[in-house]
Amino acid sequence: MQSTSAPWQDVQDLQILAQLAAQAALSSDWQEAILINKKILGVNENDVEALNRTARAHVCLGELEKAQKIYKKVLELDPYNIIANKNMEKISKSSGNGHKSIVFNYNLSNLFLSEPGKTKVLNLINLAPPNVLALLNYGEQVSLNVKTHAVSITSTDGVYLGALPDDIAHKLITFITGGNKYEAFVKSVSPKSLTIFVREIERSEKFTNQPSFQTNPITFFESEE
């Protein structure tokens, strides 16, 4: 009889399991991410990185109490853990308001819906240090900040994260100063990369017939077949 177990279940290498857990998170497969991280924790129950990944998965599923319990364990093991401290603060603020909302708890199935001409996935340049990027969560909202010749990206509390490449920045500067409005969210993040999803949410009359982003298959951010 053929086994129906997931391919990762027979994997023993913790580093490979950690990579698979991260891939599951990037695919928004939070249940799978939890299962993979639990296997890691079955070998080492005090693996702080696996605990943080598990807690984040629970957050993205809206299971804040479970996430909070895990973050508390992380802080017992590592009281100065930046990721756990930041996310515990967010959860506490959310709970204090008497509801289950949190800044990175979105309906992720709808958050990254593509709309031709209105949305774009962008890779940032001139990134912040890895310890800053480590604080980010999948689906977390970020801010676009227009300068004279550049557009920088910051967290909602003003921490610099990176910048848009010059060509797309110049286009967006024109659109934003002309009245267009945009929102942006973390699409993927690692110590050496940060990708955001940008959506046009309001178009100025000045640009009624001008899409914010190219709709043809070949653009600066897409490889030519």
Image (cartoon, rainbow, N blue to C red):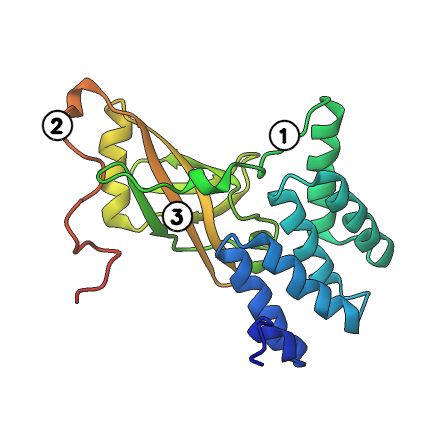
Residue located at (22% from left, 36% from top): 212
The disc, 1 or 2, on the residue closer to the chain's N-terminal end is 1
**Comparing marks 3 and 2, which lies closer to the viewer?**
2
Pinpoint residue 193: horizontal percent, then vertical percent.
45, 60
What is the C-alpha distance between the residues marked 3 and 1? 28 Å
Pinpoint residue 133: horizontal percent, then vertical percent.
55, 53
The disc, 3 or 1, on the residue closer to the chain's N-terminal end is 1
Pinpoint residue 80: horizontal percent, then vertical percent.
79, 53
| Type of amino acid under label 2 | Asn
Q: Quadrant of residue 86?
A: top right
Quick one: SS at disc 3?
strand
Quick one: SS at disc 1?
loop
| Type of amino acid under label 1 | Ser
Q: Considering depth in this image, is 8 or 4 the residue closer to the camera?
A: 4
User: Where is 11 relative to 81, above or below?
Assistant: below
- Badge 1 is on which residue? 101
Q: Considering depth in this image, is 60 or 48 the residue closer to the camera?
A: 60
Q: Which mark is residue 218?
A: none
What is the C-alpha distance between the residues marked 3 and 2? 27 Å
User: Where is 80 relative to 199, above or below?
Assistant: below
- Badge 2 is on which residue? 209
The disc, 3 or 2, on the residue closer to the chain's N-terminal end is 3
Image marks 3 and 1: residues in contact by CB distance under 8 Å:
no
Can you say which quadrant of the picture contains the N terminus?
A: bottom right
- Badge 3 is on which residue? 163
Judge the density around disc 3: few (<14), some (14-19), many (≥20) Cα neighbours within 10 Å.
Answer: many
Q: Is residue 191 visible?
A: no
Q: Is residue 175 visible?
A: yes
Outermost residue, front side: 1
Residue located at (54% from left, 55% from top): 29
Q: Quadrant of residue 63?
A: top right
User: Where is 8 relative to 134, above or below?
Assistant: below
